[in-house]
Image (cartoon, grey):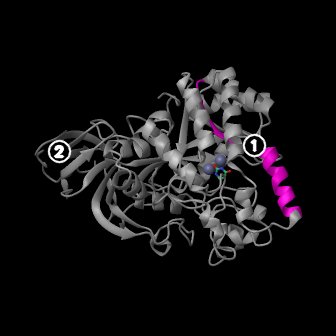
């Protein structure tokens, strides 16, 4: 039996509360919260003076050890979840992508084999590549047997991941009838494919053309179409990685008429703008992700969406590749796309920096409350994806996933110091205030300053409850 742990003198911040108290942990759960709790014999005591005690953050958008059309992501579950933990994230929900032609269950078996090395708790969303009867039957099995209560449908990548509108509608209707949450990648794939072809024919092969061939209007159009189809299908919708004012407007209109539509954005869409593509040479490849980084007006709109509550979560879309090809090889490298932007592996690292970046930007620069920060990065994602109150809060009975966060420490983001295998950061050189000091996963201290105290394989699989409840 594990010894009790007592966290003393902290300032506990949840989505709804902010108070000073001690936290007593037993058997991996929070046993008591109160003033001057006695340690008891053998208890391990941690002093949280000067720190916030936050719920372990929940990142509901990662791609670990995942094959994409151009390359496999460079972070496996051991590395990616350790990086997550260093950033205060103790739960991830990763996208399982079954290979073309494989069933969903077969894809999940393979995903389970890969996630076995995870260092934090992991759940899965399932990517659905077709809407045939076998797939729809497997969706039901996944919900009932595996606790996979959310699915992702792509409106981009024709000929690969995209569901055309008829199939999208069938998949939405099936998921809606099963009570699952429908995650949608909202970009108009066929029009983007046409723009890409035209750009390449003109000889526009540089990384920045990844962005010019994916205009904001095509996110707005796809989001609006997904919303209309979801309304007809009776399905709750979650727009992943929302990046534009147009997409946000579509979400806002739907929510105003009472439709269950939710939205996620990511730090890169809030903190960067498309000037990143003006960098010299191939540097812009670091920012090749879908959707791309947008002109500044979109970031401003997304901040408004966070304030109004029309955007509920901030996730990372951690989909890490390297910029160079050493030591992990060309197969994980952006250099695969040196000849043309459409061959650049599509995605970027970010799982380790979300909480400190958002503390600095949302709380210190945009005047958001600490409670709202906790909601965006922990509570709302846990609730929307069927993990609350086990995850996403600090409460008696919840898993003792806790972060001691020093709100005053100033530090500078450096890829050389992060724990992803990626050799760059989107936020290189950015100085932020606020830093993760200690992290507890189910009561076990896994991060102590720069020290890693966890172990590969200690992450548990999370069979989730109903998703899509606000
Ligand atoms: N969508 C994602 O969510 N991640 C990586 C690439 C993509 O298209
Ligand atoms: Zn996507
Ligand atoms: Zn993604």
Identify the mark at residue 188; answer none if there is no mark.
1
Residue at (39%, 60%) from the top-left corner?
A: 454
Mark 2 vs 1, N-terminal side: 2
The magenta stretch spans residue 183: yes
Residue range corresponding to the magenta coloring? 179-201
Report helix, strand or loop for mark 2. Answer: strand
Report x, y in % for residue 205. 79, 67
Say few, some or many: other residues with alpha carbon within 10 Å of mark 2 (under 14 / 14 to 19 / 20 or more): some
Which of the 4 image quadrants contains residue 331? bottom right
The magenta stretch spans residue 143: no
- In-image side of 281 versus 181 (left or right): right
Report helix, strand or loop for mark 1. Answer: loop
Whether residue 279 is situated above or below residue 256 in the rendered picture: below
Residue at (47%, 40%) from the top-left corner?
A: 381
Q: Residue furthest front?
A: 297
Whether residue 329 is situated above or below residue 72 in the rendered picture: below
Report x, y in % for residue 161. 76, 45
Question: In the rendered image, which residue does mark 2 sit on?
Answer: 21
Asked if one can make out residue 149 in the rendered structure from this viewpoint, the answer is: no
Report x, y in % for residue 216. 67, 48
Which of the 4 image quadrants contains residue 74? bottom right
- In-image side of 53 versus 362 (left or right): left
Viewer-nearest residue: 383 or 98: 383
Residue at (50%, 39%) from the top-left corner?
A: 311
- In-image side of 421 versus 402 (left or right): right
Whether residue 64 is situated above or below residue 188 in the rendered picture: below
- In-image side of 88 versus 276 (left or right): left
- For marks 2 and 1, give the CA distance: 50 Å
């Amino acid at each position: 039996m594990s010894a009790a742990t007592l966290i003393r003198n902290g300032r506990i911040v949840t989505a709804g509360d902010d108070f000073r108290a001690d936290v007593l942990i037993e058997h991996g759960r929070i046993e008591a919260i109160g003033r001057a709790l006695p340690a008891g014999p053998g208890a391990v005591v941690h002093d949280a003076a000067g720190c916030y005690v936050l719920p372990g953050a929940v990142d509901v958008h990662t791609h670990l050890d995942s094959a994409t059309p151009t390359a496999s992501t460079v972070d496996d579950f051991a590395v990616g979840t350790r990086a997550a933990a260093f950033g205060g994230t103790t739960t991830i929900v990763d996208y399982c992508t079954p290979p073309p032609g494989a069933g969903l269950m077969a894809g999940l078996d393979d995903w389970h084999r890969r996630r076995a090395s995870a260092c934090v708790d992991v759940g899965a969303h399932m990517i659905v590549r077709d809407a045939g009867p076998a797939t729809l039957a497997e969706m039901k099995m996944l919900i009932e047997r595996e606790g996979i209560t959310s699915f992702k449908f792509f409106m981009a990548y024709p000929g690969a991941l995209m569901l055309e509108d008829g199939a999208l509608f069938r998949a939405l209707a099936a998921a809606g009838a099963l009570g699952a949450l429908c995650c949608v990648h909202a970009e108009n794939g066929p029009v983007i494919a046409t723009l890409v072809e035209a750009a390449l024919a003109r000889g526009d092969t540089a990384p920045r053309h990844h962005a010019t061939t994916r205009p904001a209007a095509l996110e707005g159009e796809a989001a609006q179409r997904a919303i209309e189809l979801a309304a007809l299908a009776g399905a709750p919708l979650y727009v992943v990685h929302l990046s534009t004012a147009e997409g946000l407007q579509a979400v806002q209109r739907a929510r105003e008429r009472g439709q269950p539509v939710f939205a996620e954005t990511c730090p890169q869409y809030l903190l960067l703008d498309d000037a990143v593509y003006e960098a010299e040479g191939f540097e812009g490849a670091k920012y090749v992700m879908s959707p791309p980084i947008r002109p500044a007006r979109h970031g401003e709109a997304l901040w408004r969406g966070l304030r109004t509550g029309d955007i509920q979560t901030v996730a990372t879309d951690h989909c890490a590749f390297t910029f160079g090809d050493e030591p992990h090889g060309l197969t994980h490298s952006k250099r695969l796309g040196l000849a043309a932007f459409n061959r650049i592996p599509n995605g970027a690292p970010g799982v380790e920096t979300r909480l400190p970046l958002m503390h600095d930007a949302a709380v210190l620069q945009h005047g958001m409350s600490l409670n709202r920060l906790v909601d965006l990065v922990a509570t709302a994602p846990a609730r929307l994806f069927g993990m609350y109150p086990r995850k996403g809060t600090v409460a008696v009975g919840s898993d003792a996933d806790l972060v001691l966060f020093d709100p005053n420490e100033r530090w500078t983001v450096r890829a050389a110091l992060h724990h992803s295998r990626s050799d760059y950061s989107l936020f290189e050189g950015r100085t932020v205030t606020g830093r993760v000091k200690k992290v507890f996963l189910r009561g076990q201290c896994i991060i102590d300053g720069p020290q890693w105290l966890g172990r590969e394989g200690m992450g548990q699989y999370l069979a989730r409850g109903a998703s899509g409840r606000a």
